[in-house]
Amino acid sequence: MTDAKVFPAPVILWSQPEDQRAGKPLLVLLHGYGANEQDLLSLADLLPGDFAVASVRAPLAMGEGFTWFPLTASIDYSLDAVKKATDYVLDWIDTIKAGHSSVTLLGFSMGMAMATTLLRQRPADFAAVVGLSGFVVDAGDDPTFRDGELDGSVPLFWGRDQQDPVITPDKIDFTMGWVRKHVKLTKVLYTGMWHGINQQEIGHVSEFLTHEVLKK
């Protein structure tokens, strides 16, 4: 459990009012560094309407936005910081998941690091993961990352531009090795998207969610 003195109560934006969400599959949106819960919510209108979509604000203030943990290249970064952030999200998911038929995660940039860490900590809890222009955290041999329980059956969509100027090559290399070993991978490369999301990618994400979550 997280320490309430460290992190604020979660701020959540929903795509639908509460009376329209019960029993639907849940899609949790996790934004990138320096953004906020409003950043990805517009995607809800472009994705299958069968989902109840919840966009979560990261707990740490960063400039005019928020971050899940310090940047990996900064002196303040630690794996413990990543785990505290994922505990924060898991604590919230635990309060609402009983009202939904499944839980799927979608993360952009650092949000992909969050989404994949959540999966690695709770390998049986999530129907699928979508990672956009992001990466997987190198957790070494930390036992809370239960990679050995991920047998390649959880569907994961990874979309990126090879010219992305933000995610460094070492992160891409580690992520490539990890996804090939641990998940059922759908990987798509885009041109001219840089560190962003484009309409073509969202179309592919919609197809992925329909096939891997809604039709299961």
Image (spheres, rainbow, N blue to C red):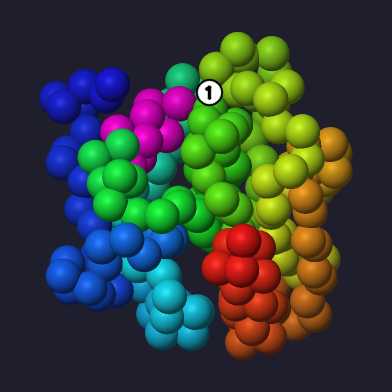
Q: Which quarter of the image is occupied by the N terminus?
A: top left
- Given residues 97 and 11, the one toward you in this image is 97
- In screen coordinates, is 112 left or right of 182? left
Q: Residue 87 in magenta?
A: yes
Amino acid type, label 1: Leu
Question: Could you tell me residue 142's position as x and y percent?
Answer: 62, 14
**Vertical side of 10 occupied by 42: above or below:** below
Question: Could you tell me residue 9's position as x and y percent?
Answer: 16, 41
**Vertical side of 51 occupied by 143: above or below:** above
Q: Which quarter of the image is occupied by the C terminus?
A: bottom right
- In screen coordinates, is 173 left or right of 40? right
When asked about the image quadrant of residue 119, the answer is: top right
When asked about the image quadrant of residue 144, the answer is: top right
Question: Could you tell me residue 213's position as x and y percent?
Answer: 58, 62
Q: Could you tell me which residue is drawn at 78 percent across and 61 percent down?
A: 186
Label 1: state its secondary structure.
helix
- Given residues 53 and 110, the one toward you in this image is 53
Q: Which residues are magenta?
A: 83-93
Q: Is residue 162 visible?
A: yes
- Figure disc tally: 1
- Given residues 12 and 193, the one toward you in this image is 12
Chief SS of the magenta region? helix
- Given residues 166 and 207, the one toward you in this image is 207
Q: Residue 146 in magenta?
A: no
Question: Could you tell me residue 164's position as x and y percent?
Answer: 73, 65
Q: Could you tell me which residue is drawn at 14 percent across and 25 percent down?
A: 5
Which residue, given by chain and number where applicable, does mark 1 sit on? 79
**Vertical side of 56 occupied by 97: above or below:** above
Q: Could you tell me which residue is drawn at 21 percent across and 27 percent down?
A: 6
| Label 1 crowd (10 A; few <14 / some 14-19 / many >=20) | some
Q: Is residue 109 visible?
A: no
